[in-house]
């Protein structure tokens, strides 16, 4: 039956038949244009299930290590092991993404991640898990992520039209943060009911959803890529030179490096804060993660809805300042409910900034450099996190967790002030670059 005039179909951006739309659905599409794409809808559903499982494993792993060692340092060190490969391998991951079919890359990397989750779950359930086993498996998972993460970012541009890309990037960040809300809460309950081993096995099962979604996605065949003929090191060099010579990309990458080391690192200390500051168990730890995650989800949704209405510079600097102030206040409170509120506010600030920066990078980069530029961006974002995790762990051991988190938030605040004060010079450099490029 053809749709009536009162119920028009919304055409899919990928050319497939549209979905019957009510007025409410039309408003959702207007606010989040990426949902007009059938491919993105499939991806969104599959990825959010998988990411809930990923957060479940991350929280369970941190809790297991702290239970085994009672050490803030080892809690930070095992978190570092999973992100360390990004620092060394993501540049090669970007080359792979620019050379081969991105959907195929994602299918293989998701399958590998599923296998590693099952292996960790088996070790834990059998009672043979050790810190070295956890660190080796976390490192291997990080190796897979060094290829999968830039592949996801690059694949977004293939699933949606260019005018939907900003929305797709923000919603992709929303997936991460919606799962951050649900995953830790589920993790806390799962650990209490069936232990950390059950949490790892549940994560393995969650990858089935994203694998099925990827198999159902239909994208046009990728055109031949000249980069495939270049030696790997030369291809990496091209990506680095392109990123460094681009004034806005260079500024974003440098700013992200500071936030990655001194901003995100507080997350690895939440198991310590939960037990030592608020005397909470695994369920309370999950609530801390979820409070930040709800704020993060709110921030990414606001970015998607405010596309083109608010200056990117304001969203980035304002968001980081809000994050720094809220996180500093979090370290001074002894009331868990007040702590939840401050983490919520911090989440809004940090992810408003990050969603804006990621969307800006996606819009600015040429498609032939997309995989390599996103790998550089993600190398700095995720690869520098081990440095941050180690420094916050060491500072926590010597000066206390609150002082360590407070120090990081102060450094991030100073970086945001510097960015705001020099925004005029940065914009002038961008205008000069565009004129010279012509």
Image (cartoon, rainbow, N blue to C red):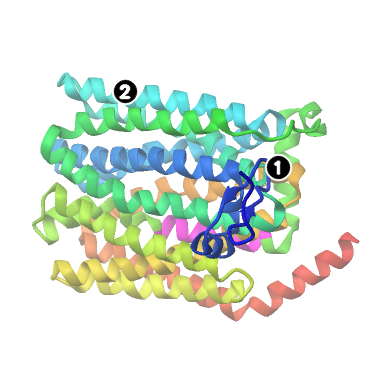
Q: How crowded is mark 1: few (under 14 residues within 10 Å), some or many (20 or more)?
A: few
Report the residue at 33% width, 43% height from top: 55
Q: Does the magenta stretch include residue 252?
A: yes
Could you say where residue 273 lies in the image, as x and y percent from the top left? Answer: 19, 57
Q: In which quarter of the image is residue 407?
A: bottom left
Which residue carries the number 2 mark? Answer: 118
Considering the numbered disc 2 on the image, is that residue within a helix, a strand or a loop? helix
The rendered magenta stretch, by its main secondary structure, is classed as helix
Q: Does the magenta stretch include residue 205?
A: no
Q: Which mark is residue 390?
A: none
| Whether residue 381 is situated above or below residue 149 in the rendered picture | below
| Whether residue 2 is situated above or below residue 288 in the rendered picture | above
Quadrant for the C terminus in the image = bottom right
- Residues under numbered marks 1 and 2 in contact, where contact means CB atoms less than 8 Å apart: no
Number of on-image labels: 2
Q: Looking at the image, which is closer to me, 296 or 94?
A: 296
Q: Looking at the image, which is closer to me, 403 or 204?
A: 204
Q: What stretch is highlighted in magenta?
A: 249-263
Q: Is tag 1's residue or tag 2's residue first in the polypeptide sequence?
A: 1
Please state which of the two labelled residues, at mark 1 or mark 2, is closer to the viewer: 1
Could you say where residue 310 lies in the image, as x and y percent from the top left? Answer: 59, 76
Which residue carries the number 1 mark? Answer: 15
Q: Distance between the residues labelled 1 and 2?
A: 38 Å
Could you say where residue 289 lies in the image, as x and y percent from the top left? Answer: 27, 55
């Amino acid at each position: 039956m053809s749709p009536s005039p009162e119920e028009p179909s919304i055409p899919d951006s990928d050319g497939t038949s549209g979905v019957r739309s009510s007025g409410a659905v039309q408003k959702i599409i207007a606010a989040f244009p990426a949902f007009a794409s059938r491919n993105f809808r499939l991806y969104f559903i599959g990825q959010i299930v998988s990411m809930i499982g990923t957060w479940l494993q991350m929280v369970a792993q941190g809790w297991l290590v702290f239970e085994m060692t009672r050490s803030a340092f080892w809690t930070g060190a095992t978190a570092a092991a999973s992100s360390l490969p990004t620092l060394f391998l993501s540049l090669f991951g970007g080359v792979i993404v620019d050379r081969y079919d991105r959907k195929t890359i994602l299918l293989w990397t998701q399958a590998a991640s599923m296998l590693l989750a099952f292996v960790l779950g088996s070790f834990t359930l059998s009672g043979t898990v050790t810190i070295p086993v956890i660190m080796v498996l976390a490192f291997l998972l990080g190796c897979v992520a060094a290829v999968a993460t830039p592949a996801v970012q690059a694949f977004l541009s293939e699933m949606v039209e260019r005018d939907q890309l900003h929305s797709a990037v923000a919603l992709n960040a929303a997936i991460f943060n919606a799962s951050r809300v649900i995953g830790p809460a589920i993790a806390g309950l799962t650990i209490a009911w069936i232990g950390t081993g059950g949490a790892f096995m549940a994560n393995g099962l969650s990858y089935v959803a994203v694998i099925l979604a990827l198999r159902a996605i239909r994208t046009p065949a990728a055109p031949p890529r000249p980069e495939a003929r270049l030696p790997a090191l030369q291809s990496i060099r091209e990506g680095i030179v392109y990123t460094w010579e681009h004034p806005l990309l260079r500024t974003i990458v440098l700013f992200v490096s500071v936030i990655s080391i001194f901003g995100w690192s507080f997350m690895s200390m939440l198991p310590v804060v939960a037990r030592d500051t608020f005397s909470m168990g695994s369920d309370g730890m999950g609530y801390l993660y979820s409070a930040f995650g709800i704020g993060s989800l709110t921030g990414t949704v606001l970015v998607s809805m405010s596309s083109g209405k608010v200056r990117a510079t304001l969203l980035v600097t304002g968001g980081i300042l809000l994050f720094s102030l809220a996180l500093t206040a979090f370290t001074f409170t002894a009331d868990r409910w007040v702590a939840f509120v401050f983490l919520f506010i911090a989440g809004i600030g940090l992810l408003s900034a990050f969603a804006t920066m990621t969307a800006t990078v996606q819009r600015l980069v040429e498609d032939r450099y997309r995989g390599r530029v996103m790998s550089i961006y993600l190398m700095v974002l995720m690869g520098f996190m081990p440095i941050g995790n180690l420094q916050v762990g060491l500072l926590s051991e010597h000066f206390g967790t609150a002082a360590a988190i407070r120090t990081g938030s102060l450094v991030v605040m100073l970086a945001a002030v510097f960015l705001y004060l020099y925004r005029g010079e940065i914009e002038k450099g961008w205008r000069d670059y565009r004129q010279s490029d012509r």
